[in-house]
Amino acid sequence: MLSDAHRRGSRCAWCSTALTAETAVDAGERTAEDGGQLFPRGCRRCAAVAAYRLLQQHAPACDVCKVSAACPTAVAAVRLMREGGL
Ligand SMILES: [Zn+2]
Ligand SMILES: [Zn+2]
């Protein structure tokens, strides 16, 4: 019998650590306007680092971020950073 983890075969997109329901971060895999994937599935720590990097690139170029703190991309990134202890 294979465990659920084996069946899913889910691993961190960045460090390839095997993910469980408790360690995995799935930010709802959304597609950015340019077609790129914002947050693939990964472990908390890697997702936090990736979110931080994304925010650094995103914020200066985002018209929503310039005028408000309610940009969904920024909110999601900050949440991932907090969850990952960044
Ligand atoms: Zn990882
Ligand atoms: Zn933004």
Image: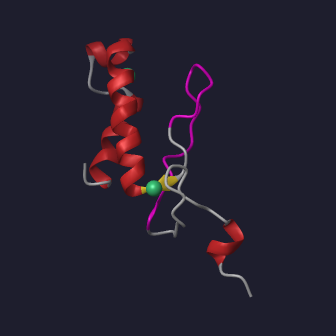
Q: Is residue 1 above or below residue 12?
A: below
Residue 81: % across, % down: 31, 45
At horizontal 35% and vertical 29% (from top left) the residue drawn is 55
Residue farthest to the right? Answer: 1
Residue 15 horizontal side relative to residue 63, left or right:
right
Give residue 49's quadrant in the image.
top left
Placement of the N terminus among the 4 image quadrants:
bottom right
Q: Nearer the viewer, residue 21 or 72?
A: 21
Q: Nearer the viewer, residue 62 or 43?
A: 43
Residue 73: % across, % down: 41, 31
Residue 11: % across, % down: 58, 60
Residue 54: % across, % down: 40, 31
Give the number of marks: 0
Residue farthest to the front? Answer: 15
Residue 20 horizontal side relative to residue 60, left or right:
right
What is the span of residues highlighted in magenta in the rendered image?
23-38
Q: Is residue 4 above or below residue 77?
A: below
The stretch drawn in magenta includes residue 24: yes
At horizontal 32% and vertical 26% (from top left) the residue drawn is 56
Q: Nearer the viewer, residue 74 or 40?
A: 40
Residue 57 horizontal side relative to residue 35, left or right:
left
Q: What secondary structure characterizes most of the magenta part?
A: loop
Residue 60 horizontal side relative to residue 16, left or right:
left
What coloring was used for the rendering?
A: secondary structure
Q: Quadrant of ligand 1?
A: bottom left
At horizontal 59% and vertical 19% (from top left) the residue drawn is 34
At horizontal 27% and vertical 19% (from top left) the residue drawn is 68
Q: Is residue 51 above or below residue 3?
A: above
Residue farthest to the bottom? Answer: 1
